[in-house]
Image (tube, rainbow, N blue to C red):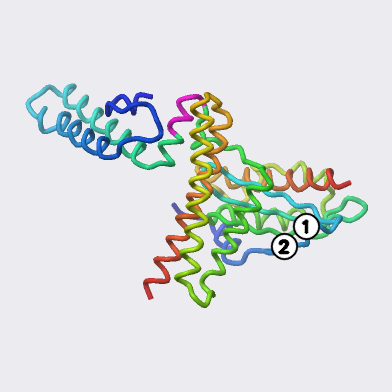
Amino acid sequence: MAYSDKVIDHYENPRNVGSFDKNDPSIATGMVGAPACGDVMKLQLKIDEAGIIEDAKFKTYGCGSAIASSSLVTEWVKGKSIEEAQKLSNTEIAEELALPPVKIHCSILAEDAIKAAIADYNSKK
Amino acid sequence: MRFFTLFGLPISFNIDLDQLHAQYRELQKAVHPDHHASGSDSQKLLSVQKASEINDAFQTLKNPLTRAEYMVSEHGFDVRHEQQTIRDGMFLMQQMELREELEEIEQASDVETALDDFYDDVKQLITEYTDAFQQHFNQSEYEEAAMAVRKLRFIYKLKEEAQHLEDKLLDF
């Protein structure tokens, strides 16, 4: 299966890899896993008092599409409000990266990681 | 549970692998398309279909993970093809940490021992979640059994990655 150029670019130069301190009150952590393939994704958002996402980091153990999907969303969510980030859908991710149907679950994983992080943020408030 | 009955096996996770192999060979022989070379086209097609079904069933039952996946899929939980994610934070955090640990093994002073210890941990997790799966399954708690199978997929993936690392380290 051929990966798109965008997937390869994110895979070879992943943006925003790493971790924040999950105990920091301004950090929201989303952990999700895809049982179909065993990929694990951690997405962390640094959210300011006005509810704007200042920064994002990720760590993903999975295939190229899963890494690219999470790398892409860390770029997309920066500067967005929580409400805007909540609306990001997997189809936008899949379209941007030109994911084939068998890799759609990677984009679902990334969308759910954002939602899990926002849920964590709301539970911390 | 057609796959089990095909091989004359009782419907249970703990199967007799010798019996599975022996039955598989018998069945393959019986449906081999060469036996039906003189038959009509529809007979030949039927024998090809049958052979492929037997092969499918054999591959599924031979491997403990796909066997467990098959057992819960027969009760409506198609975990192998589902798209939804799991969010069990504790479990995923542990999986993340184990993957980080595996990444660091390459730099360990005694790689072999570090890898052995790692395999021990993975095996223990496999036993733990396989037991949980069986217990729930035997009590007809299929939702819980399916969740144990989903988690097993992550653990077996981890084992696969440890094997890749081992191959890489032994292959220099």
Magenta segment: B70-76
Residues behind callouts 2 and 1 on a single chain: yes
Q: Please state the horizontal and vertical placement of residue B58, each as a whole percent of the image.
A: 30, 36
In the rendered view, does A22 fall on the left or right side of B139?
right
Q: Name the residue under label 1.
A: A22
Determine contact: label 2, label 1, CB under 8 Å.
yes
Give the position of the C terminus of chain B as an image quadrant: bottom left
Amino acid type of the residue that numbered disc 1 sits on in the rendered structure: Lys
Label 2 marks which chain's residue? A
Q: In percent of the image, x 71 and y 54: which residue is there?
A: A43
* 10 Å crowding of disc 1: few (<14), some (14-19), many (20+): some
User: Looking at the picture, does residue A15 appear above or below residue B83?
Assistant: below
Q: Which tag is nearer the camera, tag 2 or tag 1? A: 1
Q: How far apart are marks 2 and 1 (CA)?
A: 8 Å
Amino acid type of the residue that numbered disc 2 sits on in the rendered structure: Ser
**Element type at marker 2?**
loop
Q: In percent of the image, x 50 and y 68: which residue is there?
A: B114
* 10 Å crowding of disc 2: few (<14), some (14-19), many (20+): some
**Element type at marker 1?**
loop
Q: Mark 2 points at which residue?
A: A19
Displayed quadrant of residue B17: top left
Displayed quadrant of residue A105: top right
Q: Please state the horizontal and vertical placement of residue B18, each as a whole percent of the image.
A: 25, 39
